[in-house]
């Protein structure tokens, strides 16, 4: 069943979720980092720096910088592809999965609070 929101409701939801994240002691990700993280967790692997850069329409250094930050937060890990050492494969982590599960719960809770 599709969810129908007016533009003002969608913006309110985005605001309320963002506000929850700012107030929480959790990781503070940029829009780009969040998009990369969601791509890694919502789309089937394998994920590579090259593939993510192509998908998002950004350069490989942009992806690498984001992965450096998210790797330090333990949200993702990466390693060289043993079959092709030129590729860096990005993997999901337990911490990353838990972070996104919690975020999903926040989105659901805030959506339920939206005025109808």
Image (tube, rainbow, N blue to C red):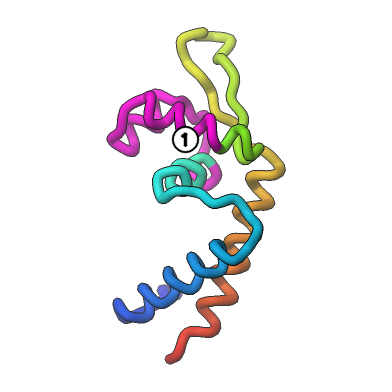
Q: Is residue 1 above or below residue 73?
A: below
Q: Is residue 54 left or right of residue 39?
A: left
Tell me the quarter of the image containing the N terminus: bottom left
Q: Is residue 64 magenta?
A: yes
Q: Nearer the viewer, residue 22 or 44?
A: 22
* Residue 67, position as x, y percentages in the image: 51, 32
Per the image, the residue denoted by label 1 is 66
Residue 74 picture quarter: top right
Q: Is residue 30 above or below residue 103?
A: above
Q: Is residue 60 left or right of residue 40?
A: left
* Residue occupying image coordinates x 37% and y 80%: 9
Tell me the quarter of the image containing the C terminus: bottom left
Q: Nearer the viewer, residue 4 or 36?
A: 36
Residue 6 picture quarter: bottom left
* Residue 75, position as x, y percentages in the image: 62, 40
Q: Which residues are magenta?
A: 41-69
Determine whether the residue tagged by mark 1 lies in a helix, strand or loop: helix
Predominant SS of the magenta segment: helix
* Residue occupying image coordinates x 36% and y 73%: 11
* Residue 52, position as x, y percentages in the image: 40, 32
* Residue occupying image coordinates x 56% and y 37%: 70
Q: Nearer the viewer, residue 19 or 9?
A: 19
The total of numbered circles placed on residues is 1
Residue 63 picture quarter: top left
* Residue occupying image coordinates x 62% and y 30%: 77
Extreme residue toward the bottom, this view: 116
* Residue 86, position as x, y percentages in the image: 46, 10
Q: Is residue 8 above or below residue 96?
A: below
Mark 1 is surrounded, within 10 Å at the Cα level, by few (under 14), some (14 to 19) or many (20 or more) other residues, namely some
Q: Is residue 56 magenta?
A: yes
């Amino acid at each position: 069943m599709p969810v129908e929101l007016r533009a003002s409701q969608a913006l309110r939801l985005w605001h309320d979720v963002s506000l929850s994240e700012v107030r929480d002691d959790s990781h503070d990700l940029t829009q780009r980092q969040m998009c990369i993280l969601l791509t890694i967790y919502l789309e089937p692997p394998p994920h590579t720096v090259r593939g993510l850069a192509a998908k998002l329409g950004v350069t490989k250094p942009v992806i690498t910088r984001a992965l450096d930050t998210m790797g330090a937060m333990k949200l993702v890990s990466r390693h060289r592809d043993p079959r092709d050492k030129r590729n860096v494969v990005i993997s999901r982590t337990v911490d990353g999965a838990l972070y996104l599960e919690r975020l999903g719960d926040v989105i659901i809770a805030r959506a339920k609070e939206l005025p109808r």
